[in-house]
Image (tube, rainbow, N blue to C red):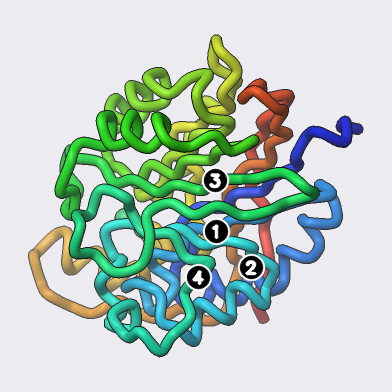
Amino acid sequence: MSKSPSELSVLFFGDCVGKMGRLALAKGLPLLKDRYQADFTIVNCENATHGRGCSHEHYEELLKAGADCLTSGNHFYDSRDVFRPEYDFSKLVRPLNMGPKAPLSGSRVFNVNGYTLRITNLIGRVEVPGAQSNPFTDMDQLLATSSEDFHIVDFHAEATGEKRCLAEYLDGRISLFVGTHTHVQTNDAKILDRGTCFITDLGMCGADDSCLGMGKDNAIAKVAFGLPLPFQPLETGMARLDGIHAVLGLDHKGALIEPISFKVNIA
Ligand SMILES: [Fe+2]
Ligand SMILES: [Fe+2]
């Protein structure tokens, strides 16, 4: 669709899992950015390094692939690189409500086409570790002192109900609300009553023939029998890039949100 000069075309992809996710983004993002004429592209990177966090090397790899900003989640601390001040992580946003001692920032502002775009990451409180405070009231506090043209929130959470409640709580106050963490894309992308674009979960970027991006044998042994086996790296085969394309308008009035599930063959 054509868009007005005051609208932003945005791509947001779900949790990047391991090498397959990184390779698929490197191969697929240039094509998708061109197809959707994207002004800004975001990727959740919490599983980019062998499923556990995002090293500084892989942070740079994902930016080189075409991401303009990376968000995170409960695996944020798994790469110790985030504690090393010599590394530039200025385009990574970790969950805002991980407490005052967490390194890096939970909300950052970018300039896009002459407009200000705020990206905020939050983590849920139902069956996911890491939250140190209430994401609802933390957003109230943030919104009381911020006035950017566009605002995108990645709510990294397990429970669909918690995600929908926060999205409705923020409807009309932010431009786009996406959920991450489950690695399974939901079939409910829509524009909420007051204009906020919404999806419960983006899905993942990683191996298609897998258990949520992980090698099947070790994942089954872990879930079925409690065996503490490591994540099996997957490096070839079909990968999927799950996410959304959204066209965001001023005053948090969304024009479009549509799911993307794009297959990439990694030879
Ligand atoms: Fe994840
Ligand atoms: Fe997660």
Q: Residue at x 81, y 61 (%)?
A: 31
Residue 90 image label: 4
Q: Position of residue 50 (x, y in %)?
A: 38, 78
Foreground pick, 154 / 189: 154
Asked if disc 1 and disc 2 are in contact, CB closer than 8 Å, the reply is yes
The quadrant of the image that shows the C terminus is bottom right
- Badge 1: residue crowd in 10 Å (few <14, some 14–19, many ≥20): many
Does the residue tagged 2 have its C-beta within 8 Å of any atom of ligand 1? no
In this rendering, position of residue 250 left or right of residue 178: right
Q: Which residue is mark 3?
A: 118
Q: Are marks 2 and 3 in contact (CB under 8 Å)?
A: no
Name the residue furthest left. Answer: 226
Mark in the foreground, 2 or 4: 4
Element marked by disc 4: loop
Tell me the residue at 67%/58% (across/down): 263
Q: Residues within 10 Å of mark 3 (few under 14, many from 20)?
A: some
- Going by the numbered disc 3, the residue's amino acid type is Arg
Report the residue marked by disc 1. Answer: 43
Q: Amino acid at mark 1?
A: Val
Q: Looking at the picture, does residue 76 appear above or below residue 250?
A: below
Q: Which residue is mark 2?
A: 25
The disc, 2 or 4, on the residue closer to the chain's N-terminal end is 2
Quarter the N terminus occupies: top right
Check contact, mark 4 vs mark 1: CB within 8 A.
Answer: no
- Under mark 2, the amino acid is Leu
Pair 1/3: label in front: 3
Residue situated furthest right in the rendering: 2
Q: Dot 1 lies on which element?
A: strand
Q: CA distance from mark 1 to mark 2?
A: 9 Å
